[in-house]
Image (cartoon, rainbow, N blue to C red):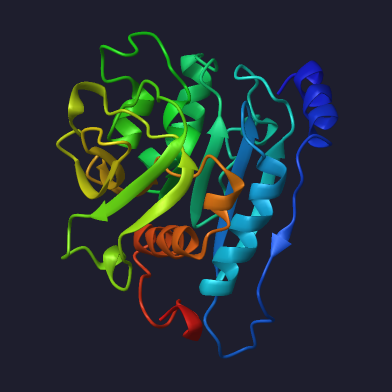
Amino acid sequence: MTPTSSHSFRIHAVLFFLCVFSQSVISAGDVKPIRALLVLGGCCHDYNAQKDFLAKGIAERAHVEFVIALDKDTSTGHMNPVYEKADWADGFDVVIHDECSSDVKDLAIIDRILEPHRQGLPAVLLHCGMHSYRSEGYPKAVTPWFEFTGLQTTGHGRQAPIHVSFTDATNPIRTGLTDWTTVNEELYNNSEGKLLETASTLAVGQQDGSTDATVVWTNNYRMKTRVFATTLGHNNATVEDARYLDLVTRGLLWSCDKLNDKYLRPAAK
């Protein structure tokens, strides 16, 4: 890192909040918590509130502790400072990508973000995380970020309730979850109406009689890395909804291959 970029990183460090959340003190014979990095920031969402809904809500449901990287820049073209260094993901068991960075298009940056996942680091993608990193070739080509997500979306219509229906009864993420209807939300479209061959639909959403769109899915990234993804989560009322937090918690544990009674807290079993 050059002196200039190092100085820039120190300045931007004040723009994101790093904090460890844990629901309780883990005693010496208990399970070692999963260490998760939650990356948020950019355009269009109340990330300052949603970081707490997610970290607290997931920690209440599973043995997970969080480091939060919140970039308070509200543009779509600013890179979260946590990605400044090549070793940005060292020490984490999973990364939640909840940023809104559609105009961060530099392939060198995108490769830096993706490299740990290419090496097997599990990931969770939430809402606008699907609309980020639109590099050259978007939306016609399978761009690097599209390959990672497993499903490309290009936009959404007006906000209205979304009826969420689970479609894969065999997926362990689904266990204990039921169909529900959200508050007003953004139903992201599915580019060309299909997932990549590496991805599998877990739930579809319908809004005002619209065609079903995949809203929850999993992706086997490069046949090496588990990725859980949902396009739900624009408004605070959705992100703090117990049904949403149950879904994301189970998806996170699945991505780490730890969706079991050892990692789920008693109230979440």
Q: Is residue 91 visible?
A: no
Q: Quadrant of the C terminus?
A: bottom left
Q: Residue furthest front?
A: 208
Q: Quadrant of residue 134?
A: top left
Most foreground residue, 99 or 147: 99
Most foreground residue, 230 or 124: 230
210 in relation to 117, above or below: above
| Numbered-mark total | 0
Q: Is residue 45 left or right of residue 112?
A: right
Q: Quadrant of residue 28?
A: bottom right
Residue 214 position, x and y percent, is 26, 40
Most foreground residue, 211 or 140: 211
Residue at 34 percent across and 35 percent down: it is: 149
Residue at 46 percent across and 58 percent down: it is: 244
Q: Is residue 39 visible?
A: yes
181 in relation to 104, above or below: below
Q: Quadrant of residue 33?
A: bottom right
Q: Quadrant of the N terminus?
A: top right
Residue at 26 percent across and 11 percent down: it is: 140
Residue 264 position, x and y percent, is 45, 77
Q: Is residue 146 left or right of residue 267?
A: left
Most foreground residue, 249 or 204: 204
Q: Is residue 70 left or right of residue 88?
A: right
Residue 227 position, x and y percent, is 35, 47
253 in relation to 267, above or below: above
Residue at 31 percent across and 36 percent down: it is: 208
Q: Residue furthest top?
A: 136
Q: Is residue 125 left or right of residue 179?
A: right
222 in relation to 23, above or below: above
